[in-house]
Image (cartoon, grey):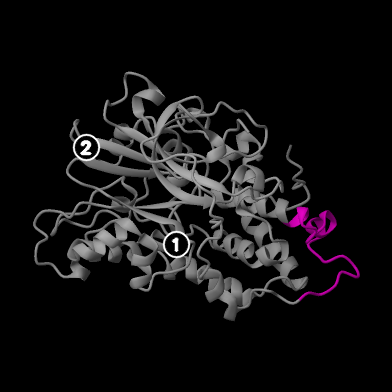
Amino acid sequence: MSNDHTHDQPSDPALQVKALESLLVEKGYVDPAALDALVDAYENKIGPHVGARVVAHAWLDPDFKRALLTDAKSALAGLGITGWRSANLIALENTPGVHNLVVCTLCSCYPWSVLGLPPTWYKSAPFRSRAVIDPRGVLGEFGVELPEDMEIRVWDSTAELRYLVVPQRPPGSEGLSEDDLAALVSRDSMIGTGLARAPGAAQEEDPA
Amino acid sequence: MNGIHDMGGMHGLGPIEIEPDGPVFHAPWEGRVMALGDSMGPWGNWTVDRFRHLRETIAPADYLTKPYYEQWLMTFLRLFREAGLVSEAELASGRPEAGAPKQQPKIRVEDIARVAGREGTARREDGKPPRFQPGDAVVARIISPTGHTRLPRYARGKRGVIDRDHGVFVFADTNAHGRGETPQHVYSVRFAARELWGATAAPRDGVYLDLWNDHLEPS
């Protein structure tokens, strides 16, 4: 099926990409400065810091939370979060009875507008294969144990809908500012492979 | 296609290599792959569905072992060639062929906001009435197309319940092959974990899939 003829090209992807970029620049298709700007956007403009702000805002403002769960696109636009295919975003609320977990078993669909590009494990075969058949085992690998009677809902991103989990607000976070609350919202808690951190807990997780 | 990419429900693919605070790109070339794909998009006008299908045709051993962004590179190269933007000779030599016209980039720095601002274009508002309502019992069709489909094997033939109607979207299964957008309703369908996996699954757990009208029949 494959008609890749890569035998004449450097096998190291770094060298291969370098050669491809210089070819495409020489042909006039791409602008190196635009490539730099795009990489900067992926690395710095989008990322879990955006989603953490959304979650913290939802924790503080019940009207916003309701709007977010009903029509995430409009709610996010109200916070100035647009683009990156955010039109078809759906927010899922974790509650004492329901835990949501997001996966893309077929490829690597992920809510770029609020979480940025996905981490390597999210795109990996072990996570993609087992999240749907053994969500509790997967959560255990992330150090998350849920009560047996809690309902786990796994969302397989098979179409152009993207999912953001709104984790439960941790106990002891009353009175915290939106910025302090956002610091409790890890990337994994918005995928469903983690929970929001307790206030004062060491940030051994990813820096959201 | 019943390919290696359709891995939901498989066992034996190893432990999850959790990397809590990994960088966005682990090497500069990974970011260049993303940026090159974005910058070349307006030259080829390929669809995300075509991209996904071509990635699915990577040989299974490579699919399981090659780094993610290398797979994207392989896929973009296929798209560039399909669209006639680069030739085999150019890829081999790294130089434009003699007489190849010099183009002007379509994505410049001032266009980045437009690239970032894309909201997602798969939704189509054509007023088509939905076939199903939330609460309706459905069954996912048993199909085995050799081309692209977004109906995973693990759900085929299984019974579920419509959770919500997402509205009308481009149908990936036809669009990936240039057979038209055939817009239709996409539904969130809840499948009980026990329906999918048997009696060892937790009784209250469920898996939600976003499936197109053509993937579903009334149950």
Amino acid on which disc 2 is placed:
Glu
Q: Mark 2 sits on what residue? A: A145
Q: Quadrant of the N terminus of chain B?
A: top right
Q: Chain of mark 2?
A: A
Q: Nearer the viewer, residue B92 or B190?
A: B190
Q: Quadrant of the C terminus of chain B?
A: top left
Residue at 65 percent of width and 60 percent of height: A17
Q: For the residue carrying disc 2, how many other residues have a C-alpha within 10 Å: few (<14), some (14-19), or many (20+)?
A: few
Q: Of helix, strand and loop, which one carries label 2?
A: loop
Residue range (magenta) = B80-103
Above or below, B206 relative to B74 = above
Q: Of helix, strand and loop, which one carries label 1?
A: helix
Rendering coords of residue B113 (x, y %): 52, 75
Q: Which mark is residue B30?
A: none
Q: For the residue carrying disc 1, how many other residues have a C-alpha within 10 Å: few (<14), some (14-19), or many (20+)?
A: many
Residue at 68 percent of width and 74 percent of height: B106
**Is A177 left or right of B57, judged from the image as shown?**
left
Of labels 2 and 1, earlier in sequence is 1
Residue at 43 percent of width and 69 percent of height: A82
Rendering coords of residue B170 (x, y %): 58, 51
Task: From the image, state whether disc 2 or disc 1 is nearer to you.
Answer: 1
